[in-house]
Image (cartoon, grey):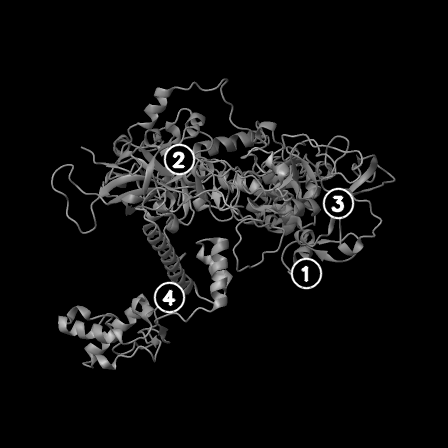
Amino acid sequence: MTAQVTLKSGEKVKVNDHVYCSPPWSVRDGTPYSIARIMEFLPPEGAGKGKGKGKEIYTRVRLAWYYRPSDVSDRPVADSRLLLAAIYSEICDINQLRSRCHVLHRDKITDLAGWKKRPDRFYFNRLFDPYIKKEFDVIQATDVRNLPDHIRQVLTSRYEYVVAEKDVVPDLTDTLRLCATCSEWCANPDTVGCDRCKNFFHMSCVQPPLLAKPSRGYGWTCAPCSKRHEEEVDKHDVRHPTPVTKPKSNAPAPRGRGRPRKDRSLAEKEENVEIKYFKMWPFRYFGQYTVAEDTLDPDDLIFPRSATRVGPKYQATVPTTLDVPSPSDPEQRGGDYTVEVLSAINTLTDEEIAEMEAWKVVLSRKPEKLHSVDWLTEALRRFTQAHVSNRGWSTVDMSVIPTRPEKWKKGETRHTDREWTADEVTAFEDGIFLYSAELRAVHDEIGTRSMAEVVRFYGHWKNLRLEEENVRIRAARLKAKDEGRDELPSVTAAVTDQFSDDEGSIMPGLSRHNNSCGACRTRESENWWRAPKGLATDILCDTCGTNWRKYADLNFRTVREDVLPPSKKGSDKREGTPLNGPSTKRVKTSTSASVNATPPPNAPMAPQLRCLACQKNGPVGKVLKCNQCQFRVHAASCGVHVEKSAVDSWMCDICQNEETLESSMHTDCLLCPRRKSKKKVQFPNADSFLRASKPTEGQGWAHVLCAVFTPEISFSDVSQLRLVEGISTIPKQRWASKCALCGETSGAVIRCSDCVREYHSSCAWRKGHHFGFEIQPVRHPRRDGMITTFKGETGNMVPVVCCQEHENSRRELYDVCETDETGETALQVYCRIYKQAPVTQAHALLRKARRLDQTLNIRTDGASSADVSAEPALQCDMCSTQYSPAFYPSGHYSGRWRCHKCHFEHRNGVGVGQSPDDSLSPLDDTMDG
């Protein structure tokens, strides 16, 4: 029979039930409840197992923890019912269990919206490993199909879920993959797939065998498909067009019509669904670094793993020095001469211990030192030294030397910390008030103490607060006893019971300073709870208190700054009405006082957001706000097209890349200088327009501002400002020039339009320089290139950057977010006309190759890639192909060209099939190279 335990709330819980867990309020310091799964009940530590069924005494419980997203990341998460599983357990006191809750995997919930509406219901679909600080996907074990039958049967019979990396999940859930050569199962680490025939091969079954997989972003084709493709190219029967991808939409997945039917029996079945556990865990890691055959071993480790750090990439290879003589008789650590005896009290007799205790009392006149752990530890160490060296107890002195020598250390170590000054204590308490138990931030606030000293002082300081609280409780008991009452009031009784659910967190009621709920501002509640730090008041109503303790969610309502003091007119308002709520009575007006009267409030307007590019407000939809980092920008100035239904869920490119991993996680702009900072910043600041970044063709990142105002840069798709191309075409002088603002010589600089100063675009934006677009009139429209019309002005649109000193410039600039009659911004118009890459003339790889040729100056006659692209009818006189990254002129026949392949093969002396009308001698090949 499964053991059951009855909680103080009256609920019965058993093994594998999910519960709320929390220590007393004074220990958890206002943090919400933790959520965990009961793995097993344990007897008291050191006690034997009880005799007979049902007679066991359980005082401890082993819990498997769940994390909230806010516990592992600073990014806000709108869903308060979402959890992160973990393969991590701890043993806690059984009195810390509060009440029961329900946690299920997302795939086992039919109606998620209905599930979240019910109280005490949570769900998870990811796992967080606290050791390697990484998140993994969690899928059902029955969904894994790409495994041999005997391994899959063992996996599904033991575990309910499988933990894997996001990139590995599609491979696990695919159909069984067999090698096209040997017909054996293809494990993911040793398998390559053909991009054309979609077959899979072992890397050792390919001829010649592959030593490594292709790099990320590159494909691989098998030998038959590669040969077939070469034949198609030689016949000139096919030319693959540039694939046109549909722009990615942020709209949610389409849902069926109507609302899901509420089935009470179905919800109860989901709550009581049977979950398989193996050695008390429902899941195991089966990802990139797992060997499939190892899972058959029942003792195989189930924890997530990462890449090994053993090898020459991480360890230094130090050559052996044969000429240096080794020291004679080196002192080996761990020998009899190097052992430091810390305590030998266990070898003393009872008489010697009593004599030592008598001498220990007289070592200090301060009674608090006799209870200090640090002082007692050092006293026992010195008594031990005296006993080992056959000295008397009277030779031990604790008042002269506050330090002690230690082996393997150059200097001496203090056995107690130096006294804290009043200023340091004040700074410590201010840091605790601001950052709570985040001792790293408190340490930075103090500045004169080490981290170890701050941690030790925090323990002493917290014990002192508990002592003061216990003194107040005893005084309240004595007062109640003197007044003839047998028990304390309900609130005091709740405070004294440190293991009850209301331990010190119930407040007696409203007071002068705590006159409303700190979250929703209401004044009516059946019970009042202590509020976490940082709110307007120190109390929460019953609803907000429950939401905070269980779901870590608060319904904030800001406090008005112009709240009037309480008066007779204020008493007309019903108690419980929010302070910033509308008045129920009509305001009496007077014509005589109309001049000095306050104007009536404006009608409610649509919510406005401030764009970080132009610092102007705009309606939601035109100005977008990132759902994760709260970055705000005009959609038209960032190349974003979002449907109305997906405005609230929109994420910027950097936040979206954290989920898709399409580009590099290193988001520094390639056009800006690489600054070395002691303080590590992973992402750009979300409070600046420089947060707007776009991926480059090499999977890097570039600021939208830098890409637009750098003349050599272009975009593959100007409607979305993706992908950034042409960074390699920026002249070397611009990379080597020194920025006039930051002084760095790395990064590409631009020049001021009114002076000769050069600086980085990002530095100019931070210093407040003027960015805009100017319409310059043209005399000959056909000769002067592309012209445009913006707000009635016609001419060439030119990007302009001016220093702050040129405020009186006569230039008429259009702001980045300024729109014309059609609603198109100046940035959009400029990019659409001048920044579009020639995607119709050549695909991305060919454009990149031409830019590379132009940068490296491969052509001997000085012809640029633009000269080649101007004549699309070129043909190789060796293999008669018209498709090549570059064509090279023949050195002996005017008007003839060679493709990239034939040119370098003849240059290196490699023969290929030649055309009938071209037969060159080896000397000619050498002269032509």
Mark number for residue 772? 3
Real-space Cα distance between discs 1 and 2? Answer: 51 Å
Residue type at mark 2 is Phe
- Local secondary structure at mark 3: strand
Q: Which label sits in the foreground, 4 or 2?
A: 2
Real-space Cα distance between discs 4 and 3? Answer: 57 Å
Q: Which of 416/531 is in front?
A: 531
- Which residue is labeled 1 in the image? 738
Q: Residues within 10 Å of mark 3 (few under 14, many from 20)?
A: some
Q: Measured along the vertical axis of the image, is residue 391 above or below residue 357? A: below
- Local secondary structure at mark 4: loop
Residue type at mark 4 is Val
Left or right: 132 as drawn, with respect to 875: left
Q: Earlier in the sequence, mark 3 or mark 1?
A: 1
Real-space Cα distance between discs 2 and 3? Answer: 47 Å
Q: Which label sits in the foreground, 4 or 3?
A: 3
* Residue 171, image x, y percentages: 39, 34
Q: Quadrant of residue 900?
A: top right
Q: Residue furthest left?
A: 51
- Which residue is labeled 2 in the image? 124
* Residue 251, image x, y percentages: 55, 29
Left or right: 101 as drawn, with respect to 899: left
Q: Earlier in the sequence, mark 1 or mark 2?
A: 2
Q: Residues within 10 Å of mark 1 (few under 14, many from 20)?
A: many
Q: Earlier in the sequence, mark 2 or mark 3?
A: 2
Q: Which label sits in the foreground, 2 or 3?
A: 2
Mark number for residue 318? 4
